[in-house]
Amino acid sequence: MNTPTPDPVAAGRIVVVGSLNADLTIYTQRLPGPGETLQGSGFGVNPGGKSANQAVAAGRLGADVALLGAVGNDANGAMLLDSCSAAGVDVAAVRTAEGVETGVAVVTVDADGENSIVISAGANGTLSPADVDQAAGLFAGASVLCLCLEVAPETVLAAARAGHDAGATVVLNLSPYAPISADLAQATSVLLVNAHEASQFLDGAPIPGPDAPEGSWEPVAERFAGRGLDRVVVTLGAHGSVVLDRTHDADAPITRIFPTRVEAVDTTGAGDAFTGGLASRLAGGGNLADAAAFASVAAALAATRKGTQAAYPTAAEVAAAREANPA
């Protein structure tokens, strides 16, 4: 078997539109039940927010990234801008909203690295289609646009249309889950969902388990295609992911991406590391299956460290992990 060569730095520009949050994280042995109080074993305030995480993840992998969003005029906002800038992310289009605090996520992480998260939008709630219009030049020449649902639906749609019209590959991470309009689906090039979100989007349709044969995914691919989505990545947590891509190979549209085995410490933000890794490879001209395989390694490495943005790997770290564990 040939040893993989080091992965190239992504060539195209990535634009990320959406949220920046301060993560208030506490570690416990297990997640509390309703009405239950537990002792924690550590606390930290760290930079987060799905969109900021995705931008930082791509930036640390060597991509050319710009972020459009909003923070408050406070210490948390400054922390987020510093973290993004340190990863090489262009934050010129991140607006400081007066009179409102930076968004916050309260995160609880258990001994197995699993988490529960509650979000308060703060300044993220002020991001509007007007911000997208004002940053129109940001989308010109963009190769990939990353979106999630942590900002207003009308803002997500405006950004998706701007990216689509500019010829970018529009990657929509359907998280936190919410139904989307037909217009947003039409502007989306690649839909990124976990198994639970996939089932919700497809009106409760069963999603095959991690050990199911590839053929069992064909009805799922057909259902997504019926919604106008021919390119979908379904992540399966520690079990890898499945790529449904009718545009790459109509005769073999289903590709199983097997996981990179690691000892998870904190899975917070691992999905965003996946999105950033996916975007960096797509911006470099890779196909969707190759991009998902690369992203899977980046997400696995992120889960081996506490926190979100500080846990994200570099391109050299991902290359080393792939050489140590060739597919």
Image: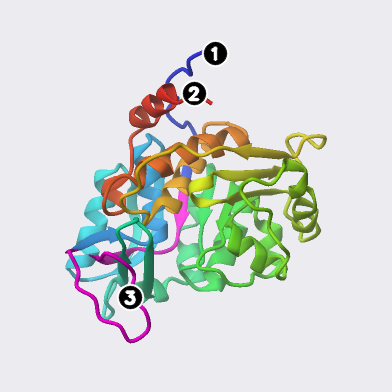
- The residue nearer to you, when weighing 158 against 202, is 202
Three-letter code, disc 1: Met
The span picked out in magenta is 15-43
- The residue nearer to you, when weighing 215 against 317, is 215
Residue 190 image offset from top left, x and y in percent: 63, 50
Does any portion of residue 267 appear in the rendered image?
yes
Q: CA distance from mark 3 to mark 2?
A: 39 Å
Residue under circle 1?
Answer: 1
Q: Are marks 1 and 2 in contact (CB under 8 Å)?
A: yes
Query: In the image, is 79 to the left or to the right of 288?
Result: left
Q: Which mark is residue 326?
A: 2
- The residue nearer to you, when weighing 68 against 181, is 181
Quarter of the image where one finds residue 249: top right
Q: Of callouts 3 and 1, which one flags the residue occurring earlier in the amino acid sequence?
A: 1
Residue 176 image offset from top left, x and y in percent: 50, 68
- The residue nearer to you, when weighing 209 against 292, is 209
Residue under circle 3?
Answer: 32
Query: In the image, is 321 to the left or to the right of 295?
Result: left
